[in-house]
Image: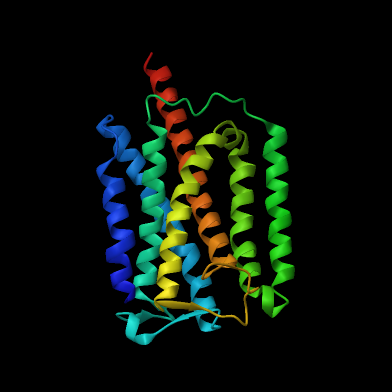
Amino acid sequence: MSYLQFHVVFTIPALILMRAIQPRIMLSDRRKANISVGLIAVIAFIYTTPWDNFLVANNIWYYGTDRVIGIIGHVPYEEYAFFLIQTFITGLWTFWLLHRPTVSWFEGSSSQRARWLVSGVFLVAALAGYIMMDASATLYMGLIMAWAAPVLALQWIVGGHHLWKAKTLVLAAFVPPSIYLCIADAIAIWNGVWVISEATSTGLMVGVLPIEEILFFFVTNLLVVQGALLAAHQLQHSKLAGLRRAL
């Protein structure tokens, strides 16, 4: 299996499905939502590119040259596409859940205590990640935590009280695509599309899948979901403010 074939089998069909099931809501609302997911994809691309290039440059993960079309820097074209495709899959899935008319996702109360507690947990995770980077066996896990946890903390600092209110939606939005991509990742590793270095990982496995890869997909999808929900909240707030001004 090549990296391109991986996309054809696993990610592109999922992206097409997510686009096909989008709810029929007001065109202006759909356009704003698509723009929000697009902006999150751009931010994810910019933020992930130097980090992933560092991973490949240091052989933390690597690929066979016969499995990819070409590279920019150290990373295959198909990997750059993965940044965007994953973001759109998860973002559109979140958007679909958000507009389920039969589900009340925001019945809970917001909590400032939870906001600062969860923010603190992610900041501690970021610190732990930096410490773990000192040992080769925990380097990959440390890099994931040091890269993702500060942004997760920032999301909770900015809007954690809203995220807590929508915690059921957060779980429903980021867990299913994470599980799906972990399964796809395991198949890709089993077929030799890419390899996770044993020298810089803990060796803890779920089948053929290193625990670091599971962590990666769960935290990256959590980043997308929380970003999408915070953007959706801001759009709704702006819409309500516009209606109040009109009245």
The image quarter in which residue 99 lies: top left
Residue in the foreground of this view, choosing between 20 and 73: 20
The residue at the point 44 percent across, 73 percent down is 189
The residue at the point 28 percent across, 71 percent down is 5
**In this orientation, does residue 232 appear?**
yes
Q: Is residue 79 above or below residue 126?
A: below
**In this orientation, does residue 36 appear?**
no
The image quarter in which residue 34 lies: top left
The residue at the point 54 percent across, 83 percent down is 59
The x and y percentages for residue 202 are 65, 73
Quarter containing the N terminus: bottom left
Q: Is residue 212 above or below residue 19?
A: below
The residue furthest front is 207
Quarter containing the C terminus: top left
The residue at the point 39 percent across, 20 percent down is 243
Q: Is residue 231 above or below residue 205?
A: above
- Side of 164 where 177 appears, left or right: left
The x and y percentages for residue 172 are 49, 40
- Side of 99 where 21 appears, left or right: left
- Side of 86 where 24 appears, left or right: left
The x and y percentages for residue 21 are 28, 40
- Side of 100 where 148 appears, left or right: right
The x and y percentages for residue 50 are 50, 72
